[in-house]
Amino acid sequence: SILIESIFSTEFAIRRECAWAICNAIGGAAVSQIVAMCKQPRLIEAICHMLVGTDVKLLVVCLNALNKILSVGKTQLNKVGLNSYRVE
């Protein structure tokens, strides 16, 4: 997705807006929509990439989005009982 890739490759103002858009979409999404979004390559990595800044509001939005993804993953545990969205 262009939003995800823009988080890695453009100036901060654009990265910030892309992160807000992604996190807002996750925040208002149903479980099935989050599952579909997480199939996008680098989605979780992109959100984590934004956790290094000093914009507290953006950090909170990103952490809330990650929390929602992990909560959905917990309800969708794979066959061996692991959260598919965890990062090792």
Image (tube, rainbow, N blue to C red):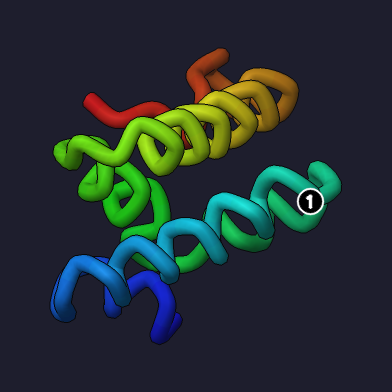
The vertical placement of 43 against 1, above or below, is: above
Q: Quadrant of residue 37?
A: bottom right
The residue at which mark 1 appears reads as 29
Q: Is residue 47 left or right of residue 49?
A: right
The residue positioned 64% from the left and 19% from the top of the image is 74
Please provide percent x and percent y for residue 11. Answer: 16, 76
> 78 or 73, which lies in front?
73
Please provide percent x and percent y for residue 6. Answer: 28, 78
Please provide percent x and percent y for residue 87. Answer: 29, 30
The residue positioned 37% from the left and 34% from the top of the image is 59
Q: Amino acid at mark 1?
A: Ala
The vertical placement of 49 against 73, above or below, is: below
Mark 1 Cα shell of 10 Å, populated few (<14), some (14-19), many (≥20): some
Please provide percent x and percent y for residue 36. Answer: 67, 61
Q: Quadrant of residue 27?
A: top right
Q: Is residue 31 left or right of residue 12?
A: right
Q: Is residue 33 left or right of residue 47?
A: right
Residue with the most extreme bottom position: 2
Residue with the most extreme top position: 81
> 50 or 69, which lies in front?
50
> 83 or 3, which lies in front?
3
The vertical placement of 56 against 80, above or below, is: below
**Considering the numbered disc 1 on the image, is that residue within a helix, a strand or a loop?**
loop
The residue positioned 44% from the left and 36% from the top of the image is 57
The N terminus: image quadrant: bottom left
